[in-house]
Amino acid sequence: MKIIDIIKTGKPSLSFEVFPPKTSDTFETVKRASEEIATLNPAFMSVTYGAGGGTSEYTLEIAKNLQSKGVTALAHLTCVNSTKQEVSARLKSLKESGIENILALRGDITPENRERESWDYHYANELVSQIKRDYDFCVGGACYPEGHPECDSQSKDIDNLKRKIEAGCDFLTTQMFFDNNILYNFLYKLGNKGVDVPVVAGIMPVTNGKQIKRTCALCGSLLPPRFKAIVDKYGDKPEAMKQAGIAYATEQIIDLFANGINVVHVYSMNKFDVASKICDNISEIIK
Ligand code: FAD
């Protein structure tokens, strides 16, 4: 099923994210974890794409397996490290595997790819255009309620985001945020700039205090004082941090549903127990 049609039903629901293994020896473990999460009956499941593209086969295999279990899969695809021919070949494989949904991304600029002289792709809108020109995939794009770290103004970032939508992006998924007001302000600004595609809100249940400080520093997400206090207090106590992180994410999700967001994407990071606890916490809300 196409994700845009799932979003359009207007039913409050969750989607979950899994990341593929880096090496073949952990493939079965990740596959099993994704199958377990699939039993929670999410609206869809997304499968990330390894930063350098080297694990693209695993993204495809995990997404294909999820589809075969009856779960709508969203396969991530980055382009910055790829040639047009490589992307064409990946799109063909995705199509032949029955995948209907792609999250079209540029990928991060790293010290390894920064020096490339002649890139085939500079921005995600070029990938979206290629996909929409050649196929009928439902295409999602990333958006950044606090602005993308490379862009010096949010207004410019939203103008750039519009290029993806003009290229045919059907929906957007947000970077994680820990204060829902940040999302509400962002949605208001999108509306003012005429962006009218549905936005799926990305929520990260934080289960590791140290890791989240690093991640937020990299992706530019603000840690609000209320959340920072939780990380400071429980960051060194893994089980307490997990419980507090799940409770915090649950509160965010309930508030998002109450304020008109229909689909919340949970950055569940292959953790069935975390995904399952969140489903339990809102079982009556998404019934
Ligand atoms: P773009 O939309 O191309 O934007 C990148 C920057 O360029 C922004 O600053 C933007 O303002 C600017 N820009 C965009 N278009 C133009 C233009 N035409 N002209 C000038 N400036 C422009 N990474 C992975 O490696 N694998 C994943 O699976 C993955 N999944 C992700 C899922 C989500 C929901 C999110 C939010 C991010 C994900 N990322 C993933 C990270 C992503 O690859 C990085 O954030 C990357 O730096 C930007 O990707 P993008 O598709 O948003 O790029």
Image: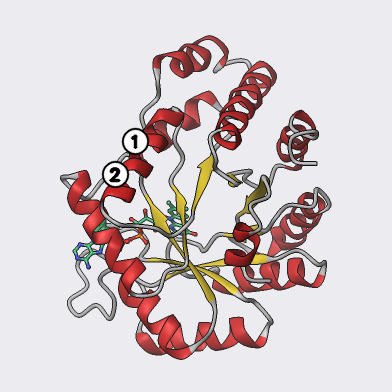
- Residue 1 appears at what percent x and percent y? 69, 71
Name the image colouring.
secondary structure
Q: Residues within 10 Å of mark 2 (few under 14, many from 20)?
A: some
Secondary structure type for disc 1: helix
Q: Is residue 82 left or right of residue 235?
A: left
* Residue at left offset 75%, top offset 42%: 272
* Residue at left offset 79%, top offset 52%: 41
- Residue 218 appears at what percent x and percent y? 34, 40
Numbered tag placed on residue 263 in the rendering: none
Q: Between 95 and 56, which is closer to the camera in this rendering?
A: 95
Pointer 1 residue Cβ closer than 8 Å to ligand 1: no
Secondary structure type for disc 2: helix
* Residue at left offset 41%, top offset 88%: 133
Q: Amino acid at mark 1?
A: Asn
Q: Between 119 and 159, which is closer to the camera in this rendering?
A: 159
Q: Residues within 10 Å of mark 1 (few under 14, many from 20)?
A: few
Q: Are marks 1 and 2 in contact (CB under 8 Å)?
A: yes
- Residue 183 appears at what percent x and percent y? 41, 37
Q: Against 21, is 152 above or below?
A: above
The count of marks equals 2
Q: Amino acid at mark 2?
A: Lys
Residue 78, quarter of the rendered image: bottom left
Q: Dividing the image into four equal quarters, which quarter contains ligand 1? A: bottom left
Q: Real-space Cα distance between discs 1 and 2?
A: 6 Å
Q: Against 199, is 257 above or below?
A: above
Please give the residue where the numbered disc 2 appears in the rendered image: 189
Please give the residue where the numbered disc 1 appears in the rendered image: 185
Q: Between 93 and 117, which is closer to the camera in this rendering?
A: 93
Residue 2 in view? yes
* Residue at left offset 74%, top offset 55%: 34
